[in-house]
Image (cartoon, grey):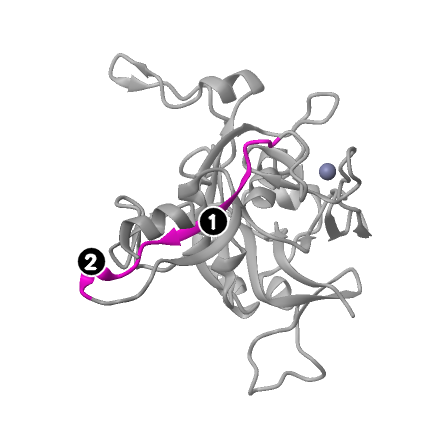
Amino acid sequence: VSTKYSCIVADPAWSFGDKLGKRGADANYKTMTVDEIRGLARWRGSEDLHDKTPPFLAMCGKRFAIADDALLFLWRVASMPQEALDVIRYWGFEPKSEIVWIKAASEHDAKVTGGKRDGDRVKTHTLHFGMGRYVRGAHETCIIAARGQATALVRNHSTRSVFIAPVPRDVKGKIIHSAKPPEFYEIVEALSCGPRLELFAREGRPGWTSAGNAVGVVKTPAPRCVECGKKQFRTPSGLTCKNGHGDAPSLQQYEVWSEGFRATGEHGRAQQHGKVRALSFKDACHGVFSGDGDFDEDKMTYWGCKLFDNERDARRAFG
Ligand SMILES: [Zn+2]
């Protein structure tokens, strides 16, 4: 049985067709046209017109199966938003949201960046001075796309859409072209469930299958808990295992209960909606009711019924 990947990161080597000469991506390594990037999608045998959803993505001579429910994190370039959307849809995903990386000029600046004002001007010297014909690139955008019931794969609902991190540099301090910072992978790991695949990868990563010209295809085992030996996974507050060891002790098991329907004149009794590990009861509710518009986060109700983290209180409230 081959692995079906439900978390896929891709940072395509977009070809800009830049008339300014060899700069950026083109100067550093072989780029691909939009057709070539789209063409990573593979069907079983010949393309079946009745099933437009590709079951595989191919790289380095290998095919990687895509799970029916999967999230795709695809980096785009500012000048080619439409091309990125085309690739996403051709690969069988629908764009849903995006993550923006604010590129700080240095590690120190990553802490202080945030548009400090100097008189009537916003100082931007703490931001990276990148390329660009109109404005100097100080951010990059990663589109989040989904297929199937992908909201069920979202493991926590407190992830912010923006993060600030310095541009990755090598040991000599030289910027590593187009490399994405470790903070990005930490966000992806805390946000979504595996198995995980990175296309256009530059290096292996624990718990990931990585494919790209720089590494070939490497499958790196997930980190193991030193206390119990179980696989570790990332949460918004750090690494943990299924026994709750590690540096994320705040992750707890929550039960989500709602009171009965007496308030609305019906006779339903208090019921349990689910059990999840989460940072807070609110996060647990988001996990249990993910995408269900009848969950009201402000009032902490479901269909107007109050939510509780235990059976006793739920029954006391209404049946
Ligand atoms: Zn453990």
Left or right position of 26 against 254? right
| Mark 2 beta carbon near ligand 1 (under 8 Å) | no
| Residues rendered magenta in the picture | 248-265
Q: Position of residue 311 (x, y in %)?
A: 41, 50
Q: Quadrant of residue 248?
A: top right
Can you say which quadrant of the picture contains the N terminus?
bottom right
**Quarter where residue 258 is shown:** bottom left
In the picture, the quarter occupied by the C terminus is bottom left
Pick the residue in front: 313 or 105: 313
Q: Nearer the viewer, residue 170 or 99?
A: 99
Q: Position of residue 159 (x, y in %)?
A: 46, 41
Per the rendering, the mark at residue 263 is 2
Depicted 174 relative to depicted 304: above or below: above
Q: Quadrant of ligand 1?
A: top right
First-in-chain label (2 vs 1): 1
Q: Which mark is residue 265?
A: none
Give the residue at the far top of this rendering.
119
- Marks 2 and 1 sit apart, C-alpha to C-alpha, by 22 Å
Residue 38 in view:
yes
- Relative side of 210 to 6, left or right: right
Q: Secondary structure at mark 2?
A: helix
Q: Is residue 57 above or below residue 209?
A: below
Q: Is residue 17 visible?
A: no
Question: Which residue type does callout 2 highlight?
Answer: Ala
Front residue (pair 28, 224): 224
Q: Is residue 250 magenta?
A: yes
- Residue hosting label 1: 255
The image shows residue 33 at horizontal and vertical percentages of: 61, 60
Q: Is residue 28 above or below residue 64?
A: above
Above or below, 158 against 14 in this view is above
Please check the rendered image and state whether residue 282 is part of the magenta-colored stretch, yes or no. Answer: no
